[in-house]
Image (spheres, rainbow, N blue to C red):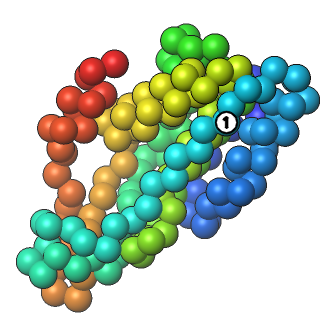
Amino acid sequence: MVFEQGNCVAVTQQMLDVAAAYTSVRDYECDRGDLGAVVVFVGLVREFDNSLADGRLQILRLQHYPELTEASIHAIVEQARSRWQLGGVLVQHRVGDLVPTDEIVVVVVGARHRAEAFDAARFLMDQLKTRVMLWKQVLNADESKWVAFKQSDADAAGAW
C-alpha cells in the first residue's frame, strides 16, 4: 500500500485486506518512530435491511462517481489531519456488489496517543457516511431499493 504524505486512500471492487491495512499503517509509523496507537475500524455489510419487505439482504450494490469519490475521501482525511496530530491514515472503501459479512470499509489511523486515533477514526467514519458520493442499493430475490439518506448519519457528522 502506497502512502502519499502519510495517507493511503483507495476505492476498489477488490476484497479488503484488514491485516495488511493495519500492518501498513503500523510499519509506516514505526519507520518514523512516533507511534503510540493504531485504531482500526471495519464496516461490514449487514444481513438484515428493514427497507426490504422480508428484511433479508442478498446484495448491497454500491455505485460511485470515481473522479469525486477519492477526492472527497482525501479532503476528509486532510480535515482530520487539521484537527488532530496524526501519523499514517488509511481509508479503503469498496464499491460494486457486496454480500452480507463482506467488509465494506476499513479506516486505520495511527497517532502518538490513543485519544487522537480514536477521535480521528470516528470523525472519518461519520464524515464518510455523509460527504462521499456513494449510492447504495439493497437487493434480494423479490425487490431492490435505493438506500435513503439517514438523519442520524447527518446528526453524527454535524456533531463534529
- Residue most toward the top? 82
Q: Which residue sits at x=78%, y=44%? A: 24
Badge 1: residue crowd in 10 Å (few <14, some 14–19, many ≥20): many
Q: Is residue 40 left or right of residue 28?
A: left
Return the residue at label 1.
Answer: 38
Q: Quadrant of the C terminus?
A: top left
Q: Nearer the viewer, residue 4 or 29?
A: 29
- Kindly identify the amino acid type of the residue bearing the numbered disc 1: Val
How far across and how far down the image is residue 120, in percent? 51, 26
> Looking at the image, is 134 positioned above or below residue 142?
above
> Looking at the image, is 61 positioned above or below residue 99?
above
Q: Which residue sits at x=75%, y=55%? A: 20
> Looking at the image, is 12 positioned above or below residue 129?
below
Q: Is residue 67 left or right of residue 156?
A: right
Q: Nearer the viewer, residue 43 or 51?
A: 43
Q: Quadrant of residue 133?
A: top left
Q: Nearer the viewer, residue 148 or 114?
A: 114
